[in-house]
Image (spheres, rainbow, N blue to C red):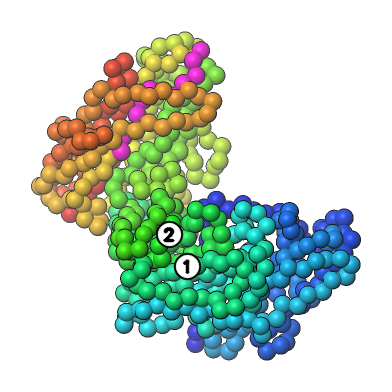
Amino acid sequence: MKVRRRALAFVGVAALAPLVASAASAQAASGSLAVTALGRHGSKVSTTVTVVAVPSGRRYSVQSGKRISLPTGRYVAMTDIYESAPDSLGTDTLGAQVVQVSGSTSVTLDARKGKAVKVSLDTPADVTGPARLDAQVCAAVTDMPSAYGVSGWNEAGHLYVIPNSSKLLEFGYLANWSGNDSYIVTKNTTGIPTAPGGSFKRSNLATMRFSVRSGTQMATQHDTALQPHPKADDCTTDLMAEVRNDTAPYIATTHVTPGTWQPRDDIFASNGDDIGGGFAKVRTLAAGQSVTQPFGRAVWGPAHYLPTVWQKSVDFVPDALIADPDLGTGGADPTKETVVLSKGSTVVKKQTLTNWGSSDYAFSARIRSAGWYRLTVDAHRYRPGITFPAGMLSSRTTLDWYFKADPAKSVVAPVFLTRFLPTGLNSRNQAAPNTTTTVDVSALRGSQSPDVKFTQVTAKSVRVWSSADGGTTWKAATVKRSGTGWQASVHNPSSGAVALRSEVTDSAGDRSVETVYRAYAIG
């Protein structure tokens, strides 16, 4: 028996939520509209109809067969007519019609007029099943048609769309074939074509290889996926294809139509909660091009936030302190941290914070005089309700900043974050015992707020240490300049894990020390 299942829920990249009004809330109504939905055998089907005003984009929702009061004007009425069938996936028929509402208006969306979305690919022998189709009909009333659409999904041969040549409509689909590799193609049209679909050749596709490592995350189940990311929003923007849902580490290869794609990763705990992951950098791919998309590489550490001096206070947002380097702030895990600001031997303020379950968290300490200040942060991953994997890496990170601050001057503190990227690790983020690992080191700064002055600061020196005993003792690494960054040679122990520490100084005496415990493992 075939089971109809929904895919992983879409999380919008930059989707707007259009205003939605129910049938009871339409104001200044001088007309009405009733939409009848007929199935593929001519019988009435109960479904939810989306009605979008042209050109305002005001959106209404009404049940088919029910009448909704509307102001006189032009509208797009659209729906997915889904019909179940015993022991099968049933059928989906997407339909839309542009209608002028004046007085009592009625319109019928008839699935019998639907045309099958036919897609073909010169697939290899390991692909034996039909393509999975995700499709959407959109009202092109703004420059974001994907925000005004209805969607349906099914296997090829079970998904239909009713043709309509109106330029107020767009039709987009994504087809996904699964085998040893997966094959994902997408297409968007203005209007709904009379012969929807397309024929595709493997030789014209690009390749993306997902390399999902283990050891650094709060859980081991990874659901990787791709979303189209057209340069101009269209009716494919909200579609998504799952690449692989499995226990890390794994490698999954997918072949896609040339264009711009958004890779993503969702991490699930054993209780089913989506506890991490995020969106990687958007990739623009040409035919024949091959790229690798990593997730879960070591080392996870602070991704963006620096202390600022503003309105006579030293402020710090303790967020993205343990983050996937390939996802940045959007791929950070929740933490609990202790933040301390001191001047000389005097503690100005000490506070323990967490960004778990809170959107109102920040450190702010009033300062009364100019001078040298020290801000320390000690952060641990923090996620109540789940059990972390044994031996999880990057479980703790610390920052120790020493900088000059003046309460009369608003500025981003002249300090740095460090990014460590070890080379040569295996898929479990392990180095071989008793070897030497080259660690790429970058000293990073980024603007924090448009209200706070950001100045360029040059790193005068960069030093790196490693520890094989959890930070009890430290051994200096050899550091050399490499391009815009540095490379450190770290000697690995025979077992356990390696902690990394950096110190970045500038010519004015400002100092930034960062430590990541259990940065990578030995195995």
Residue 236, position as x, y percentages in the image: 53, 63
Using the image as rendered, state which of residue 271 and residue 267 is in the foreground: 267
Question: Compared to 405, does 9 lie above or below?
Answer: below
* x then y, percent, for residue 157: 52, 83
- Within 10 Å of the Cα at label 1, are there few (<14), some (14-19), or many (20+) other Cα atoms? many
- Residue at (89%, 67%) from the top-left corner? 103
Q: Is the residue marked by circle 2 packed among few (<14), some (14-19), or many (20+) residues within 10 Å?
A: some
Q: Earlier in the sequence, mark 1 or mark 2?
A: 1
**Separation of disc 1 and disc 2 at Cα?**
9 Å
Q: Is residue 25 left or right of residue 279?
A: right
Residue that label 2 marks: 259
Q: Secondary structure at mark 1?
A: strand
Indicate whether residue 222 is drawn in magenta.
no
Please give the range of residues in magenta. 408-419
Q: Nearer the viewer, residue 368 or 61?
A: 61
Confirm whether residue 383 shows in the render.
yes
Question: Is residue 24 among what the camera can see?
Answer: no
- Compared with residue 3, is residue 20 higher up or lower down, i.e. above or below? above
For disc 1, the marked residue is 186
Pointer 1 and pointer 2: residues touching (CB < 8 Å)? yes
| SS assignment at label 2 | strand
Give the camera-side residue of 145 and 297.
145
Which quadrant of the rendered structure holds the C terminus? Answer: bottom left
Rendered position, 199 above or below 269: below
Q: In the rendered structure, which amino acid carries the disc numbered 1?
A: Thr
Tell me what residue is drawn at x 12 percent, y 50 percent.
433
Q: Residue at x 53, y 54 (%)?
A: 232
Task: Name the quadrant containing residue 159.
Answer: bottom right
Q: Is residue 333 left or right of residue 439?
A: right
